[in-house]
Amino acid sequence: MLLWTVIRRLIYSVILVVAVLVLNFLLIHLAPGDPADVIAGEMGGATEEVLASIRKAYGLDQPLYVQLWVYLKAAAGGDLGQSFFYNAPVIDLILDRVGATLLLVFTALGFAIVVGTTLGVIASRKPTGIVSNLVTVISVIGYSAPIFWTGIMLIIVFASLIPLFPISNMYDVTKSVGPFGYALDVAHHLVLPAFTLGIVYLAQYSRLTRASMLEVLGSDYIRTARAKGVSERKVYGRHALRNAVLPIITIAGLQFGGIVSGAVLVETVFNWPGLGTLAFDSILARDYPTILGILFFSAVIVIVANLITDLLYRVADPRIRMAK
Amino acid sequence: MTVLKVDNIVVDFATRRGNARVLDHVNLEVNEGEILGIVGESGCGKSMTALSIMGLVPSPPGNLTSGSIYLEGRDLVGLSKDEMREIRGNEIGMIFQEPMSSLNPVFTVGEQIAESVRLHENASQRAAWERAVEMLRAVGIPEAEVRAKSYPHQLSGGMRQRVMIAIALACNPRVLIADEPTTALDTTVQAQIFDLLEELQKSRGTAIVLITHDMGAVAQLADRVAVMYAGRIVETGTVEQVLTMPRHPYTEGLIACVPHLQPDPPEKREPLLEIPGVVPSLTELGDGCAFAPRCNRALATCTGRQPVLKTEGNGHATACWAVEAELENV
Amino acid sequence: MTVLDTKDESLPRAEHPAAEAWRVFRSRPAALFGLLLLSIIVIVSLFGPVLYAVDPFEIVWAPLTPPFETETAILGTDNLGRDMLAGLIVGGRATLLVGVTAALITIIIGILVGALAGYYLGWVDDVLMRITEFFQVLPPLLFAMVLVTLFSPSLPVVAMSIGIVSWPATARLARAEFMRIRGLEYVSAGRSIGARDGRLIWRVILPNALAPLIVSATLTIGVAILFEAGLSFLGLSDPNTMSWGLMIGSGRQYVLDAWWVVTLPGAMIFLTVLGVSLIGDGLNDAFNPKLRER
Amino acid sequence: MSDTANGANYLEVQDLKVHFGKKGATVHAVDGVSFTVSKGTTFGIVGESGSGKTTTALAVMRLTHITDGHVSLEGRNIGALDGEELREARRAFQIIFQDPYSSLNPRQRAADIIREPLDLMEIGQPAERDGMVSDLIKQVGLRPEQGALFPHQFSGGQRQRIGLARALATKPSLIVCDEPVSALDVAIQAQILNLMANLQEELDLTYLFISHDLGVVQHICDEIAVMYLGQIVEQADRRTLFTAPEHPYTKTLLSAVPTLHAARGDRSKRQRLSGDPPSPINLPKGCRFASRCPLVEKQCHETPPPLRAVSGGHFVACHLAG
């Protein structure tokens, strides 16, 4: 049953991936101006020769559906086009940067989930207590502060006032000695960007956990647990939390696109060499194939993340797991 | 022998509209192997009585203001949280109205029964599991070994209520509190659960407190009955006494206003007896009898002073000025 | 003959649900603070430029002058020597306008899609939800970046783009509410007494689904403002209209030399969104009877 | 047709089927139900959860789709109506629901709730409608000034009265009552049941009364059908059904009801069902009750028993009855 679900979800995911490609294709053609111009970007170097070669490569002189087919076929082979700004295949540019982005995103996410749910559970024990108020304050600030602004504030603080953490880049050539030294240095550089990105989601998870816990704690089966003589610690940790995480998994999956978006800003602020800085640079250069390639690739990341949360949810909730 | 004695308990709730006296000097006694029914409409305090015995009155806003609850002579009021936890699920078990939502959806039913065993007895995981399977068998669940590994959503409502009973009885408690155990179930399933409760009560000698709104259920199952209205007990006695010779006008009304199934229904339909009006708000009770505004036999004294339970020679007790006056005149 | 309900009672006051919500809202200090904060910002943005008539694009002093060094530019100047205070006062207009417009677009698309999917279910729901899911796999900021880059960064394009990337969450919420309420018996009763689909959707279900939608709409304004700021920070805002976002975008390279160029407009955005969020939270409490009891 | 004229076949349901879900996993909620109701009487449908009694009611009300079969009211096939025609026809049949909390729009005042059908169906002149609303409110035992209140300011019983007033507004002749008193406190049930009985007499109403409570059904119904897994297993007038039930399911159902004066421990006469009913998706080939029937025989597993008359007006779907 589970296997069949996985297969069905996989097929659906592939359809979504193709849909994103179609969207990319349409965007090129919907944008004002000659598609060849759009693909070449507004970088001055688009001579008639270059445009002609683009028209040929993309089959722009052929009917639209043929062009789409050519585009999809190329994408299936891993060819997302050529960046005229970097003068390199888009896919290579992306694969070069994606690791840094994933490292940032998952560190931030892990931090947010662990700290956020812990705070949320503590807050749910006393809905009017100090931690609960703290959760409210953190979450309101996390909601309201522009993420890049938080990052810049941290840079200002850590650049001069407390120079504890590096404020830019992913590593420092002079300090990254050996694989262990490199890892340590990357971790050191990761602190501020991951914290900046994580704090927004920490705010949301803590609030969500508190709400979810409070709802679960009012349910009949918690009363049953208490009537059995289960200790309060176990009521919270075992009986309530297992149920309260279910909506959190769902939300985490739905928000994944948002986290990737946040990463774009955080990377730009901290000069983190991931997809975000690549996107930023290619937007300055009007390098459309690269931007669209990044949009496509990050959508794929979100699709995979959704697939994983979906399966995780099935594992966590027997009601869904057993459903036909 | 008295297993459970509720002695003059008072429970208050702080609400936005002021203090609500949810239980007002409630006295109850349950003997070994006996089934005591507590009947009344919603909000009369019957469920709160159960929660008070369990030490689960939500606080705040609730507060057990005064009184004692003796379990085999030991006063439960004033026990520490840990001591009370030792008693819950071990010496007093409880089942609830909604079997659909009373079981934790993410654990198997076997785990949920075994947890109860492991909490109160120094049992190994394996021994606790075996007890769980044995309990499932005892409550009449077929293929108990297989069913123990089921999740609640895979079982029907009746099955789930059986699982709840298995959890409540796993540690062989002295008292079982059943709060509307069949209200959410179908008629035929209700009958099965009643049979099971009676059978378990006989074989294990567990005393049962049955909380219900259904006089029929009381007639079927209980030995003695207490009728509650607005946080007070208005009448108590054996089931025969209260059902065949109800004294309190409220009890009378409660019996007569329900169309009970008759084996030989009359040809012509008679209007049902009505209790006019609605249950009063607990924050707006006056000095007199809480039932007086709805009562067809109310006297002048009824609105002035609250009646107290007056016991007749045979143990049948009623809290009603009109009944007291009648009985004195005889 | 029928029996009159004899219970003699004075009639309780028939308080309209909206009046009751306002009563709860009023009792929340945080919500009132948010309302005050936002009111001040809106009033300053609307009338401030009249009282402080300095062109925010005009070069008035030496570039990167810190605050409180000259009376000409009391809050300092930016990298081109333009008056920060003038920018902060005028910049709210564009930011708020884009935020509100984008939120409106989000809400309208979201409610329309959610209402139809949640009411009709079946294939309508299938089609609309597949579209929604598709939009949800595109990282919103990246998608908006692409749209703004392709269609040039003008205020309408920015607002449209933000609307287009943010509606799915609202649609899901609206759909869930519509599905829940359409199953309630008063909707069936409405059909029995002759209400048509249109009436059931817009006059019966929508008003009852409104509470969470209003809360979400409020929070959406905040999110849209943050989006606008993010796009501006990346250089994707209208260069001809002064906005807080534009100030941040043009000042971002000078952060380490001149803390005020980004900190001040960023703080304005933070305060605005804070005001909106606090109002949203207050509305949530006001509409949610479960929380009210606590 | 002559039957219709004198009201004997006032409501006629023929071979009604309501199926849900897709191919391969079809839920046979109602599976071939037929009955007729005479004007001015109360026809009760009893059954346990999953019996299809509520779905039958909703199908008669045209509030759920009809997979197959006919529903006609006073000779008019309301099962085949659609769009505006159906909307117009709805004047004649109204419904009251089980849940007094979710059956009233919380954002409308009571008077507006009762007035809405008058406006929608254009009954009376707009100027007269306030007076009509006030009459309706009085008719269900509330005071006209209470019309200004919102639903949450009423008790459960009062809300049910408002629901009744809304149903009466279009002057219907048929009222479908879906468990109208099940959610009410026992003392309030009597108030509503008496009100319903009085209104029936006053207005010559016909009730289709859905309930799981056999005591209530016995009290209020003239003719009763017992449903099990989407089908009627027994149907008879009130006295016959309760004094001489034929179907083994009816017998167990009756013996399962706790009665007031049966002595405790008197279990020997009682029949108990074992197990759960089969899934409405994978229905057995033969009699649907066969898996739980104490009297089951071989033929029961093979052929489904038809609903047949065992005496005048008494129908049973059991091979062994009669």
Image (cartoon, rainbow, N blue to C red):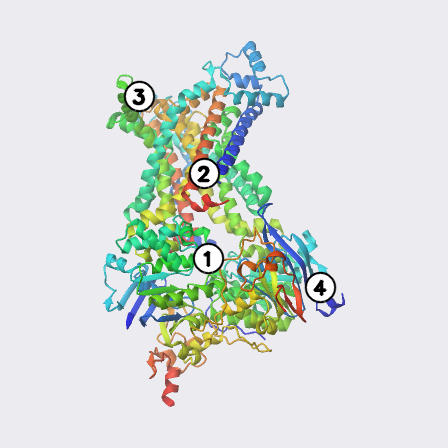
* Residue B20 appears in the rendering: no
Question: Residue A41: where, in percent of width, then height?
Answer: 51, 17
Which residue bears the numbered disc 3? A171
Is D102 situated above or below C281? below
Going from N to C along the chain, the mark reached first, 3 or 2, is 3
Do the residues indicated by labels 2 and 4 lie within the same chain of the protein? no
Residue type highlighted by circle 4: Glu
Circles 3 and 4, Cβ within 8 Å, touching? The answer is: no
Chain letter of the residue beneath label 3 in the structure image: A
Which residue bears the numbered disc 1? B157
Nearest to the observer: residue C121 or residue D51? D51
Marks 3 and 2, how far apart at CA: 35 Å
Front tag of 3 and 4:
4
Tag 3: Cα neighbours inside 10 Å, few (<14), some, or many (≥20)? many
Tag 1: Cα neighbours inside 10 Å, few (<14), some, or many (≥20)? many
Q: Which mark is residue A310?
A: 2
Quarter in which the N terminus of chain D is drawn: bottom right
Is A277 situated above or below B285? above
